[in-house]
Image: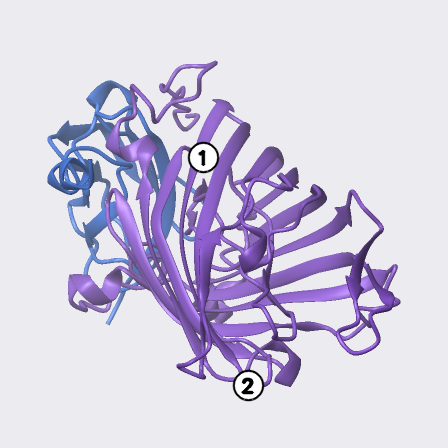
Amino acid sequence: MSSRLLRARLSGFVIAVVSISHSLAHEIVGNRFFPATLTIDDPGVNDELAVPTTDSFNTADVPPIKQRDISAEFSKRITADFAISLGSAYTFLSPTDPTAPGASGFQNLETTFKYRLFKSPEHEFVFSAGLAIEWGGTGSANVGAEAFHSYVPTIYFGKGLGDLPDIFSWIRPVAITGQIGYSIPARNFTTAFSIDADSGALTSETEFHPRVLNWGGTIQYSMPYLKSVVIDLGLPDVINRLIPLVEANLQTPVANTFTSGTLTTGTINPGIIWVGNTFQFGVEALIPINRQSGSNIGVIAQLHYYLDDIDPRGIGKPIFGGPVQPASPFPR
Amino acid sequence: MLLFLFATSTASAHAFLDRAEPRVGNKVSALPREVTLWFTQKLEPAFCSMMVTNAAGARIDTGKARVSGNQMSISLRPGGSGTYRVNWHVLSVDTHSTDGNFTFQVGQ
């Protein structure tokens, strides 16, 4: 699922734009396991369920608004390389002024179509392309859900460093993933009319909806990879299942920016993922890169299920194509 | 549904390498008679294989890999000091295939 702009809109407050992206895939490429990352999409396609994903942070409004989201997302493979995901989030907005009213409601529904174009097990590299559609009008305007659709073509990649020479063996558990998407609103601008309370005159305010580059990446250090491919240090199992990482989730308005400006906003998110056999749990801090991205350090956490492992012959297999993958014995 | 998922969390999954003997990336004083791998899931014997090569790339394993439950072993020909590489490929009982490789050293 690609990046989504969650616009916190509360009566009487400045609109703050915060982007939370929920990703939904894990991928195995040769020796490399790419976990599902929390705030940007990873490069895989798979049968998965993320529920819940919860986050909490203060927006950039003055005074700030406390925003909390809870979301769910389901991804289903149609073929081995193509998946469709569906997701939605529920938002709670709470002003810091306790006398001011808050708001809550669903964000717009989102659908993502994703195709894995290339995979190289030897080089631990995978590349995918996709299209995310935010369905305008399916959410609640009082939490900032837009009335128009948005289309986000996106590319994703992942690269493990396992093909480094042995002299760099301690770096080989590192993996890097990234995504670049271009958000295209279906509407270029919205004009709102109102009556001035003092003069009684009709006034109008036009907001231009920018085209936005949604971009980001992760750098991860895989303890499972260290243990099973580089060196077994005899650490406890709980340590061997950890993947510490840092994510960056950024947005840059690049066109139709008359009212939005061109400032890049987003967050840097250090955290950790614990990987089980059929699910993973992750938690990260959300650190705004500037004042316009938020007013405090927030947090995001996710419980994520690998349906391909939980039910490989049922919901965890592609609709077209069976679960059995042919073995490739080593040539003698 | 969540309780069901938790209850079945160990029922089936990809077979990842859990541990090995000799241990991954470690040094042993002499080349062992066999290499043994333990995986996180039970294996389908007919679709599992393992290969061990020396620093020159020559195979030193003998016979077919032996699979029992989540364990796979292969016997080795005698050999000297140096770095050895193990390549493995398995199919777990839940139909997922995984493969991987690692090295170990022999020497003082």
Q: Which residue is mark 1?
A: A75
State the image quarter where residue A9 is shown.
bottom right
First in residue order: circle 1 vs circle 2: 2
Q: Which chain is purple?
A: A
Whole-percent x and y of residue A48? 38, 37
Q: Image check: B93 left or right of A29?
A: left
- Residue B85 makes an appearance in the image: no
Whole-percent x and y of residue A219? 52, 66
Give the drawing colour for chain B: blue
- Estimate how packed mark 2 is, as few (under 14), some (14 to 19) or many (20 or more) residues with alpha carbons within 10 Å: some
Which of the chains bears the disc numbered 2? A
Q: Image check: A152 left or right of B47?
A: right
Q: Nearer the viewer, residue A265 or B41?
A: A265
Disc number placed over residue A63 in the picture, else none: 2
State the image quarter where residue A94 is shown.
bottom left
Q: Amino acid at mark 1?
A: Ser
Kindly identify the residue that appears in the image at 43 percent across and 21 percent down. A318
Q: Amino acid at mark 2?
A: Pro
Kindly identify the residue that appears in the image at 50 percent across and 60 percent down. A39
- Residue B45 makes an appearance in the image: yes
Q: Nearer the viewer, residue B69 or A322?
A: A322
Kindly identify the residue that appears in the image at 20 percent across and 33 percent down. B12
Disc number placed over residue B95 in the picture, else none: none
Secondary structure state at the residue bearing disc 1: strand
Secondary structure state at the residue bearing disc 2: loop
- Estimate how packed mark 1 is, as few (under 14), some (14 to 19) or many (20 or more) residues with alpha carbons within 10 Å: many
Q: Nearer the viewer, mark 1 or mark 2?
A: 2
Q: Image check: A213 left or right of B71?
A: right
